[in-house]
Amino acid sequence: LPELTGLDARVSIGALRGLAIEQHEAETTDRAVRDRETAFLLDRLRYILEARGFDVRNVRAVTHQPLDQIRPLDARRKLEVLPELTDSADFQTLATLFKRVKNIARELRPDAAQAASDEPYEAVLTEPAERALLNELTARRSVIDAAVEQGSGFREAFAEAARIGPAVDRFFTEVFVMADDPTLRTARLRLMYQLEQVILQLADVSEIVREG
C-alpha cells in the first residue's frame, strides 16, 4: 500500500475483502467458494512477498494467522527485520522449541484456555525453571504487545522474543508439564498457552528453524 498510495495504512485483508464485497455486492455463503478464495488470496500474498526477496520460511511465519487478520504492511515490516535476528542462538532455541510449545498448549481444555488470560495461576508455579520462564515472559511481553498494537518496533519485539528462548529450553529440561496433580498440570499448560499466544502475535517462529 505505501508504494501504491503513499499511505502507511495497516489495513487488514479482512477489511479490504469486506470493502470489495460491499463495492461489488459479491458476497457468497458457499463455504467451498469462500475457502478457495481464501486459499487463493493467501497464496498471492505469499507469492508477492517471496517475489520481493523475502525468505520463504519467514514469509510462512508472518502469515500463519487466519487470512482476514493479516495486515500486509505489518507482515512486510516484520520480514524486513527478521534476517537480522533469525541466526542468533537464542532465536533458534525458541524457534526449535516452539513447535513443542504449540503441541503442549493444545492439551489445554478450551474453557481453561479462555481463563488463561482472566484468572491468576502464577502462584501454583514454584519450580525455579517455571518461575524463570514466567518472569521472562512477563518482562518481555510488553514490548511485543506494543509492537503488534502499533505496527512498529518489530526489531525490538523479535529480539525480546528471542531472549525468552533460553528460559524455554531450561523449562523443558527441568519441568514435566503433564504432572499428576491436575492443578499444577493446568497451571503449566496455561503457561505454555500464554507463551504461545504472545509469540504468535509476531510470527509462528517454528517455521524458521535453521536447517542443519
Image (cartoon, helix red, strand yellow):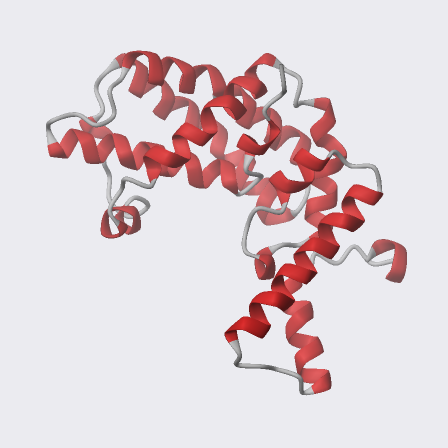
Q: From this view, report whether residue 66 is shown above or below residue 16.
A: above
Q: From this view, report whether residue 101 is shown above or below residue 26.
A: above
Which is nearer the eye, 141 or 211?
Answer: 211
Q: Position of residue 188 (x, y in %)?
A: 26, 30
**Residue at image point 66% right, 36% down:** 154
**Residue 29 in the figure: left or right of residue 112:** right
Which of the 4 quarters of the picture holds residue 86?
top right
Q: Position of residue 187 (x, y in %)?
A: 23, 33
**Residue at image point 62% right, 14% down:** 212
For the image, the number of numbered tags is: 0
Q: Position of residue 76 (x, y in %)?
A: 74, 44
**Residue at image point 49% right, 19% down:** 165
**Residue at image point 63% right, 15% down:** 88
- The quarter of the image holding the N terminus is bottom right
Which is nearer the eye, 49 or 2?
Answer: 49
Instruction: Note whether residue 72 is visible.
Output: yes
Which of the 4 quarters of the picture holds residue 173?
top left
Which of the 4 quarters of the picture holds residue 171?
top left
**Residue 91 in the figure: left or right of residue 82:** left
Q: Position of residue 61 (x, y in %)?
A: 61, 39
Q: Name the residue furthest left.
A: 181
**Residue 141 in the figure: left or right of residue 175:** right
**Residue 173 in the figure: left or right of residue 61:** left
Instruction: Note whether residue 153 is visible.
Output: no
Q: From this view, report whether residue 203 is shown above or below residue 161.
A: below
